[in-house]
Amino acid sequence: MENSSSFITLKSRSNYLSLRKSGHRIYTQHGLIFNFQSNNLSYSRLGWTLPRYVGNAVQRNRLKRYCRESSRKLSHKINSLCLDVNIVFAKKGKDQFKNLRCIEVEESINEFITKYKKKY
């Protein structure tokens, strides 16, 4: 697990496709969907999907920064789950994520962790 950050990201398209096809889903309050499945590793891997309907490139990059920062803060909780996780920003309405804050992304990740521990 040699990496400068405290979490590992999903790299290949096949990982994202397998999560979409055979993974489980948890929906959170702020419009984020977490696709996940176990990975048989001693750590978790994270990825995020931000389609164009989320906003322009500036907004999408801001949301990616929020995901990275929140994942770093909560890496000790996430890594203990040993999952592959894809965070998807769901299509709800125009400009839904424009005013989303970093703390709300962090709350969504915490919500995912508590729902996961409760159900699985």
Image: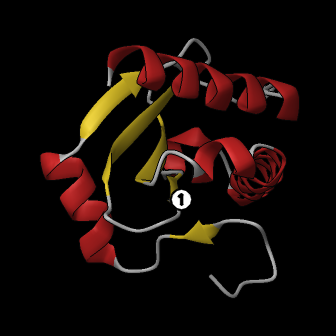
Task: Determine the residue located farthest toward the bottom in the rendered image.
Answer: 2
From the viewer's perspective, is residue 101 above or below residue 23? above
Few, some or many C-alpha atoms within 10 Å of disc 1 (few <14, some 14-19, many ≥20)? many
What residue is rendered at 79% in x and 73% in y?
Answer: 5
Q: Find residue 91 and report its image quarter.
A: top left
**Relative to residue 86, is residue 24 depicted above or below?**
above
Q: Residue at x 49, y 45 (%)?
A: 81
Give the quarter of the image for residue 35: top left
In which quadrant will I find the C terminus?
Answer: top left
Secondary element type, mark 1:
strand
Task: Please state the total of marks drawn on the protein image.
Answer: 1
Query: In terms of depth relative to the viewer, which is nearer, 11 or 50?
Result: 11
Q: In terms of depth relative to the viewer, which is nearer, 2 or 92? A: 2
At a point 66% along the width and 25% down the height, the residue shown is 110
Which quadrant holds the N terminus? bottom right
Report the amino acid beneath label 1: Leu
- Hey, which residue is sitting farthest left in the picture? 22
| Percent position of residue 112, x then y | 53, 26
Q: Is residue 36 above or below residue 46?
A: above
The residue under label 1 is 46
Is the residue 104 above or below the residue 11 in the image?
A: above
